[in-house]
Amino acid sequence: MQLNTKYHGTKEYNEKDVITFNKGIPGFEGLKKFILFSIEENEMFYILHSIENEEIGIILTSPFTKFKNYEFNLNNEKLEVLKINSPEDVLVLSTVTLDSNIENITINLKAPLIINKNEKLGEQIILDNESYLVKQPLTKE
Amino acid sequence: MLVITRKKGESILIGDDIEITVVKTEEGSVKLSITAPKSITILRKELYKEVEEENKRALNFNEDVLKEIK
């Protein structure tokens, strides 16, 4: 299948690649179906793109690349909803806010997106941890 | 929408398993204690709003900037 995105060109995908966010993503209520692809210019970053709205593509990166000690617990309820059976199922990604000044680029460590790669289910959770910020500078820890 | 008045020490029940009690009131703020099942997410609304806004900012794509990040 083909998705003509407004800002990221045309993407080929299969039905089995579609990740479902049953609860939607805050700010984009109503959109539940997304595909994930890495950015050609820098493979550290991904776009989670809506297949229901050609303009909505969210920039993401792994929080663990720059923040080695990043951690949180997923409660049983979440494991069940996302059908997670083992750590290998889980992909954790965080939203990134770009800025032309690299030092101003931030990552949202407070609200990671949890994706079950195998079941293709996702949810953004908000952590109850004071030390993780919504706007954590990405380039310095 | 339901609007009700409660005094310090009084509670409201929502459904079978959520209880919200007014613990303390002073100078324009109210301290609440909430008992709810673990599956219920309880958030300060401003934090949710902040995440919403941050998600929208993450739409802003700039490939030139991305090329510079290692």
Image (tube, rainbow, N blue to C red):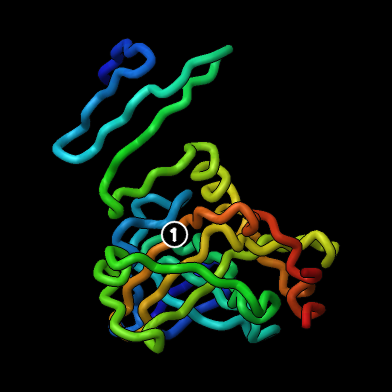
Q: Residue at x 46, y 73 (%)?
A: A4
Across and down, in percent, residue A37 comes to 51, 81
Q: Nearest the camera: A115 or B64?
A: A115
Q: Report the side of B70 relative to A129 (left or right).
A: right
Q: Report the side of B65 relative to A118 (left or right).
A: right
Q: Report the side of A8 relative to B64 (left or right).
A: left
Across and down, in percent, residue B24 comes to 46, 20
The image quarter in which residue B34 lies = top left
Q: From where the camera sits, is residue A51 visible?
A: no
Check disc 1 and report the residue beneath it.
A125
- Position of residue A90 relative to residue A112, above or below, is below
The C terminus of chain A sits in image quarter: bottom right
Q: Nearest the camera: A16 or A74?
A: A74
Q: Residue at x 37, y 63 (%)?
A: A52
Which amino acid type corresponds to the residue marked 1 in the rendered image? Ile
Across and down, in percent, residue A101 comes to 85, 62
Q: Residues within 10 Å of mark 1 (few under 14, many from 20)?
A: some
Across and down, in percent, residue A59 comes to 59, 68
The image quarter in which residue A53 lies = bottom left
- Position of residue A62 relative to residue B4, above or below, is below
Q: How many marks?
A: 1
The image quarter in which residue A8 lies = bottom right
